[in-house]
Image (cartoon, coloured by chain):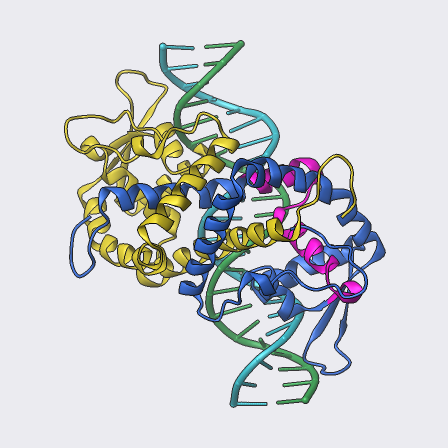
Chain colours: A yellow, B blue, C green, D cyan
Amino acid sequence: VTTEESTPLDAEEQRQWYALSYLLTRLPAELDAHMQRTAGLSHFEYQVLSGLSVFPERTQRMSDLARYTASTLSRLSNVVTRMEKRGWTTRRPDPTDGRFTLVTLTEAGAEQVRALTPEHVREVRRLVIDTLTRRQRQEMATGAERILRAIDPSTPSMADCVPRTDGRDDGAAR
Amino acid sequence: VTTEESTPLDAEEQRQWYALSYLLTRLPAELDAHMQRTAGLSHFEYQVLSGLSVFPERTQRMSDLARYTASTLSRLSNVVTRMEKRGWTTRRPDPTDGRFTLVTLTEAGAEQVRALTPEHVREVRRLVIDTLTRRQRQEMATGAERILRAIDPSTPSMADCVPRTDGRDDGAAR
DNA sequence: GAAGATTGATCCCTCAATCTTG
DNA sequence: CAAGATTGAGGGATCAATCTTC
């Protein structure tokens, strides 16, 4: 490591960063492979379907859904196009403002989510939830939020991010 | 969120999982975009170069390097081919066992790593290291190791994962 | 003109053969 | 025939235009 204006990581910091960095590669790969094997879907596709299913009317604007899934509009647009062909989503312009596009999860799409969710939750439990103590989960969630806020200061607290399915509180862009 | 044989996540677990899941998407995207902007390289390509630089003789077997970078042989082989064309790596069969392939970082490759590392470390500090307290980093690293071991029980402790560079320490951070 | 959304070109990753060595 | 490594085909992601609506 050469020096310039950034202090190199010491041995401890390096170990910590390495552990996290390794997780960043392995866990998504594992979730994706599992979803691929059990459902023939990418993990991201599942996230889109599952995300839509929790919103009122199972409907959301493309741009809000992109934020919610930590994705880009371009990537999302491609995925939604594919899912439309499978009959799981429909698209229409937002009647209140034609610049927005509303995506809706069809009944067939909702059925798909219902079929896939139990197995996915089981996997998340096995790898993450049941592997950590409650306190460890809290620590990791807090740390994650801090890092996310370093990436983007406008990141909302996760407390606001699990959308209410009652009433209509779609205010939950994440 | 239907039930079958897996218990659905409660609200708290869901928030915690959501925070981690969001991090899994955003942080790699950020590191990759940053490396792309500042160096025209993917974060993974940097990891490969940087990984090689810490091994004795700047040399490692393909299969070991694949494990070290949490990658697959196929993906690594493609990347190494690209980097060979840029003059940053060379390949040759392992003289002690012809089934293995040894990759070596050239001097030009090492120079590239030295040029890129300070800026990368600065970014890792900004997003992760300096954002968390020492205790938080420890908690996250421990949690990460636990999850990694749930994915693959043979995952070694991170204490073993920062290679000893006996003799020459150009100790890269990754 | 700005923001949402889509499309197309390019690049890279994944997966399934395939080849080689011991 | 096991395991390491490579290649080619197909699919998906990224980025830079482009189009539309307000």
Q: As rendered, which of A69 and B132 lies closer to the eye?
A: B132
Image location (x, y in percent) of residue A109: 23, 45
State yes or no: residue B49 in magenta.
yes
* The residue positioned farthest toward the front in the image shown: B135
Q: As rendered, which of A109 and A15 lies closer to the eye?
A: A15
Q: Is residue D21 above or below residue B28?
A: above
* Residue A84 visible in the shown view: no
* Residue B94 visible in the shown view: yes
Q: From the viewer's perspective, tell me whether residue B8 is left or right of residue B141.
A: left
Q: Is residue A147 above or below residue C11?
A: above
Image location (x, y in percent) of residue A89: 27, 40
Q: As rendered, which of A22 and A49 lies closer to the eye?
A: A22
State yes or no: residue A141 in magenta.
no
Q: Is residue A131 above or below residue B94?
A: above
Q: Which residues are magenta?
A: B30-59
Q: From the viewer's perspective, tell me whether residue B43 is left or right of residue A23.
A: right
Q: Is residue A167 above or below residue B23?
A: above
Image location (x, y in percent) of residue A125: 30, 57
Q: As rendered, which of A59 and A4 lies closer to the eye?
A: A4
In the figure, residue B96 lies in which quadrant? Answer: bottom right
The residue under the point 80% across, 53% down is B110
**Secondary structure of the magenta portion, mostly?**
helix
The residue under the point 48% across, 57% down is A26
Image location (x, y in percent) of residue B13: 28, 46
Q: From the viewer's perspective, tell me whether residue A9 is left or right of residue A149.
A: right
Marks counted in the figure total: 0
